[in-house]
Image (cartoon, rainbow, N blue to C red):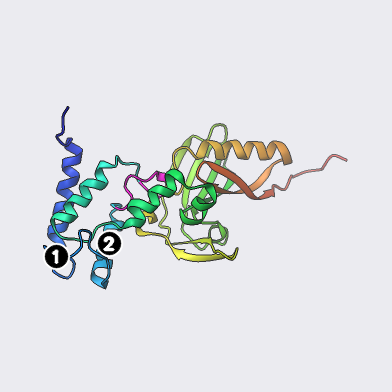
Amino acid sequence: MDFELAEEERRFVAEVEAFLAERFSPDVMDESPEQLSQTVDTPAKRAFMRELAARGWLGMSWPKQYGGQERPGLYDFLLTEALSRWGAPQPGKGVGIVGKTLIRHGNEKLKRFFLPDASAVLRRDPARPEVLLVEAAYGIGDLLAAGLVVPDRYAIRAADGGVLEKKIGRKTQMSVPRKDGGVRRVPVPPALARTDALDDGSTAPLADLWRAAETAVGPLASLSVALSGREQRVTAAALAQVQGPQPG
């Protein structure tokens, strides 16, 4: 059995070490901390953790649909080892334990409340009738509908959902459920701001949903969809205006 790190893993360790050397600060790092995992309890340490998040190093092994990169769990350990060597704050229980427990064992109600859902709006491309234009963002979808967030934009084939074009937007805020049944706006975590709101497996079901809706109600102008894990549900649909005389 080979216990040596692969080349890609060694490159990641080197990248982390270079980052820590550049960011060294006694306000953040302690060679002999009282706690094995330093508490993020000062502005300097919180700023340091935001930098880790901005680099996409928090929740690396999480599924992409919840903002992770689906990297092997070894990368989480490599990061933690490097942070420990420098006496730097480490990812807390929220990312390392609670989040992973919810992903693996949480029911759908818990996942919808605590983990970032996504919303999408589909329209047919007027210049290419065989193509659907999709805008997607994290959260419930009210900000997307109101044009208050820069969404991800996709062009997909209506026939099978194959992605033809993709441009990732910088998503800065999202709406999430409140316990009382309302919604509240919260910042999108920096690690998610420039990641795909839709994973690779979402576009084909979206195209299927569009075709099924048109079969049921007729030509559509737009279709709004909420996504939670692999579940997709229609939240609003607008019918297209049919040109010419209508059958009597």
Which residue is depicted at the point 22% across and 50% down? 79
Would you call the spot at circle 2 few (<14 residues within 10 Å), some (14-19), or many (20 or more)?
many
Would you call the spot at circle 1 few (<14 residues within 10 Å), some (14-19), or many (20 or more)?
some
Closest to the observer, 70 or 165: 70
Using the image, determine if residue 179 lies above or below residue 97.
below
Which residue is depicted at the point 57% across and 46% down? 122
**Residue at image mark 1:** 30
Q: Amino acid at mark 1?
A: Asp
Residue 220 locus on image (x, y percent): 67, 44
Q: Quadrant of the N terminus?
A: top left
Query: Magenta includes 61?
Result: yes
Magenta-highlighted stretch: main secondary structure? loop
Say whether residue 219 is visible.
yes
Residue 225 locus on image (x, y percent): 58, 48
Side of 50 where 199 appears, left or right: right
Closest to the observer, 193 or 107: 107
Q: Which residues are magenta?
A: 58-68
Closest to the observer, 141 or 35: 35
Q: Amino acid at mark 2?
A: Met
Query: Magenta includes 235?
Result: no
**Residue at image mark 2:** 49
Find residue 120 and name its label: none
